[in-house]
Amino acid sequence: MLRYMQPDTDQYGFIMNPGTGQPRKSLLPGRGFLNLPRKQLILLVVGAAIVLAILVTIVLSLLGGGPTNEDQLVGVVQRQHELIRVSDIALKEARGTQARNLAMTTKLSLHSDEVSLVAALKRQDVKIGSKQLGAGKDQETDNKLTQAIQNNRFDEVYLEFIQSALADYQRNLNTVYKTTTSTSLKETLKVQYQNASLIIGAEPEE
């Protein structure tokens, strides 16, 4: 004999009473994000800001072309070229071992540095032609050396000039290094600063 089964009203209670049972998840976006603990929320915001800053830097570097201190960097190359030129003169005119050795060391070291820096600048879309290199020529230096040859004082005058010029060049490298933002250029300048320190026998500054 079949018995009539009373329906379980609790089974369908969630239909009759929608306010009871498991709470519904909000369909509105961002509610979970806003409900995060304050510390986690701050970390997320800071992290997003850092990522955005990196992306902006990359985009600007791609669109901006060369470095912002291009004139200073070109000036360093011109100075290298000029000191090489003067050292070439010393190799022809110097009589003493000290002057000749310093001239040779200066020429070889700065020639290597010039090639390295020109290549690094080329990668930053900064091209330097022979006319720009020659723009660093100092006629006053030539006049002093010519007079020194006539007075048989070339070695003395050259040594005094090149030691002072290399010290100025080293300080200039340090200044340009601090204003350069490109990591690869900074590394190149750092090595060249150390090379200049070796030539003049001075400890590199930190």
Image (cartoon, rainbow, N blue to C red):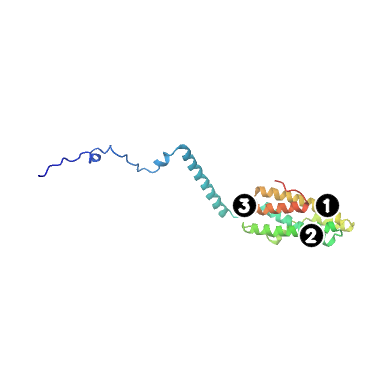
Mark nearer the N terminus (3 vs 1): 1
Q: Residue 175 has which mark? A: none
Q: What is the CA distance from the residue labelled 2 to the residue labelled 3?
A: 31 Å
Three-letter amino acid code at the position of disc 1: Glu
Q: Nearer the viewer, mark 3 or mark 1?
A: 3
Query: Which residue in the protein does label 2 denote?
Result: 104
Q: In the displayed structure, does residue 123 sit left or right of residue 154?
A: left
Mark sitting on residue 183: 3
Q: Amino acid at mark 3?
A: Thr
Disc 2 residue type? Met
The picture quadrant where one finds residue 113 is bottom right
Quick check: 50 left or right of 125? Answer: left
What is the secondary structure assignment of the residue under circle 2? helix
Q: Which mark is residue 160?
A: 1
> Looking at the picture, how far across and down is residue 187, in whole percent?
65, 53
Q: Residues within 10 Å of mark 3 (few under 14, many from 20)?
A: few
Mark earlier in primary sequence (1, 2): 2
Towards the viewer: 38 or 86: 38
User: What residue lies at 68% left-to-right and 58% top-to-bottom?
Assistant: 116
Mark 1 lies on a secondary structure that is helix
Where residue 195 sits in the image (x, y, percent)? 73, 54
Nearest to N terminus: mark 2 or mark 3: 2
Q: Quadrant of residue 139?
A: bottom right
Q: Secondary structure at mark 3?
A: helix
